[in-house]
Amino acid sequence: MPKNKEGKVYLGIDPGTHRIGYGAVQMNGNKFILLKKGLIEKKKKGYSTDQLPVIYKQISELIKKIKPDEMAVEKLFFSKNQTTAMTVSEARGVILLAGAQQSLKIREFSPNTIKQAVTGYGSADKKAILKMVSILLGLKDFKPIDDTSDALAIAITAGLIKD
């Protein structure tokens, strides 16, 4: 992974019940460099708490491999399905624990904050987010799964919003 001492590395995580997107970027000045992206996909259909230790292990290994300066995770937003909200929050808790146990600075952003930071519009759609992620990372013909694009947008947001 091309990492230098000059720029901070941000790991973005998009928690989910079936797939967890991740994306790591390095910010050098005002430029972002893609370091790693991908998905953690569960092997079994349906939700089971048996997956929580697997998620924890995979996120922990990812953190050790990438060695980010900060981890950013999307805050939950659900309007209808409480069952999905509960299962995603369980996976999200395990993700936060994995980062905390490795003493990472963890930041959380709402979907609207991510959209505003990356596109300049808090109600942007997935297509607009993907386009801006592609532009900010200097990638052509970039067609990842939404979870990966969202994770990269979360990582970029951490780089753009200083606390």
Image (cartoon, helix red, strand yellow):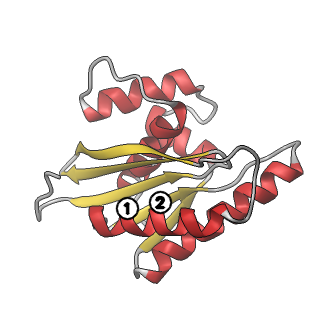
The quadrant holding residue 62 is bottom left
Count the marks: how many? Answer: 2
Which residue is farthest top? 141
Up/down of 125 relative to 161, above or below: above
- Residue designated by label 1: 62
**x then y, percent, for residue 141:** 31, 17
How crowded pointer 2 is (Cα within 10 Å; few <14, some 14-19, many 20+) is rated as many
Using residue 102 as the reference point, say whether residue 124 is left or right of it: right
Percent coordinates x, y for residue 50 in the rendering: 69, 65
Going from N to C along the chain, the mark reached first, 2 or 1, is 1
Element under label 2?
A: strand
Q: Secondary structure at mark 1?
A: helix
Task: Give the residue number, with chain letter if any, for mark 2.
Answer: 72
Mark number, residue 115: none
On the rendered structure, is 127 left or right of 81?
left
Q: Identify residue type, mark 1.
A: Leu
Residue name at image x 50 percent, y 73 percent: 98
